[in-house]
Image (spheres, grey):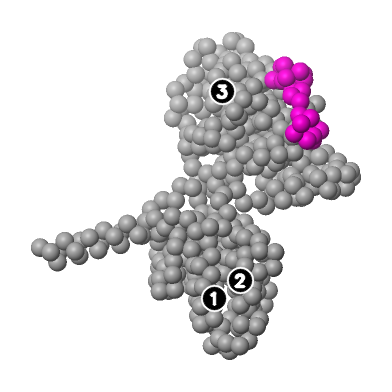
Amino acid sequence: MEIVRPQNRRNLLSSSNEAVSAPTIPLYRSAPPLEVRLEDFESFAIDRLRVLKGISDGMSRGKKAEEMENLVKDLWKVNMRHQEATQVLNKDIISHFVLRLVYCRTEDLRKWFLSMESALFRYRFRLLNAEAQRTVMEEFDLPYRAVSNVEFESIKEKLGQVARSMGQPSPTADAIFYKVPFEEVPELVAGRRVFINQGYAYVAMNQIVSLVATQFRSQLSKALILTNRKWTSSIREQEKHRLTPIVEALSSSYLGPDYSQSREYADISLKDIDQVAKSSFPLCMRHLFDKLKEDHHLKHGGRMQLGLFLKGVGLNLDDALAFWRSEFSKKVGLEKFEKQYAYNIRHNYGKEGKRTDYTPYSCQKIISSTPGAGDHHGCPYRHFSEENLRAALSGMGVNSQAMEDVMDKVRNRHYQLACTLTFEALHGMPCDAGINHPNQYFSDSQKILKPKVAYSLQLVIQTNTC
């Protein structure tokens, strides 16, 4: 693909071989001879990344196959549409190759991308009709053929036993089975969902997704290694002033609102702050808040993380100065606070220096931080010891069952999902979107809690007037 300026954009995909013969799902074997606008290069990739991260969250939550199919369908419909219907396929192919470039750069990135793209392919394949599925199989040029009627009759009883063990009816005479080497379908073999005879697995048509997905994963795995070689040997240096900054930033991009301005249910004052800290601050911010109250001081990383969060929840500049002044002056004195710390607070609010309107930190930025000795910023789910994390969660009021669920996610490095489960345990309501930003946690918490407070006040008023 070639990246061009907006005025030079041409749609070449419609004349490429891949577009002419493309099955319902592209196989992404080679990048088409397509010129792409720089803004499309980034925006298409971000839209696809929203799909992949949605799949990752759904899988981490243990959603069932049917739920995942519906999730993928909805994610694709919302994020991968295009205002021009003829450009939907273009967007699909462009976004895949951009993210292939983004995620080829390290082993961890490759592993995540390979897993999520394979899952996306699997669920998209399942949503196809039988004819479209056969078209995809033909595109892979698989050497396997359907089992003959004679062979089917000879193993019909064994196939029926396997089907019944899975709660399915026995196959009928018109059922289609493929005879493949058992190592080609490890998922089916591990789940004991196929009949194996003399080294071959007999795969039903409704199971063929396992075979096709394995082929797709193998193809993509090899392609990622080759892309990494091209990236390190030439592309990174050649595009250092244009594409490289975009590519290197995309893998850690936060895709939600920036919360630079306070939102609905996010407008607090000094008199509210102690109460809402207990009820609506996520653990990362509550820990910083408690440490500030305890030590009357935070290092720079902690001041930035908590300070920008407070700005995002609606604490205005005057109140912010008063808040930090009241705590820091107890340890460093009023004069030193005004000389060394007040400027940075005004700076965060865009009132000093370049007058940049700084945005609160996202979960991804906080998780990737590296707090040192004496620091209190970062993500507790990642940076706390298990003992300290359990103590902190208990202090918030998380019950023992919910705590075990949270700790399970932490052990599997699903830190944002651990935070989401904490939110759900404390509020007694599901958070289907997941927690992706501390300010989102606060806003969603206030949406739940404020109506309850209003309802309680209404009851009190009614009782007093009766």
Q: Position of residue 412 (x, y in %)?
A: 59, 55
Q: Which residues are magenta?
A: 2-22
Q: Spatial distance from mark 3 to mark 1, Cα to Cα?
A: 58 Å
Q: Are marks 3 and 2 in contact (CB under 8 Å)?
A: no
Which image quadrant is residue 21 in?
top right
The residue that appears at 70% across and 48% down in the rendered structure is: 250
Image point (64%, 22%), residue name: 86
Three-letter code for the amino acid on which mark 2 is drawn: Arg
Q: Which residue is mark 1?
A: 321
Looking at the rendered structure, the secondary structure element under dot 3 is loop
Q: Residue at x 54, y 32 (%)?
A: 77
Mark 3 against mark 1, which lies toward the viewer? 1
Q: Which mark is residue 128?
A: 3
* First along the sequence among labels 3 and 2: 3
Residue picked out by circle 2: 346
Occupied quadrant, residue 465: bottom left
Q: Which image quarter is the N terminus in?
A: top right
Residue in front for this viewpoint, 233 or 438:
438
Relative to 286, does residue 248 appear above or below in the rendering? Answer: above
Most foreground residue, 280 or 73: 280
Residue 174 in sight in this render: yes
Find numbered disc 2 in the image and state the secondary structure of the residue it sits on: helix
Numbered label tally: 3
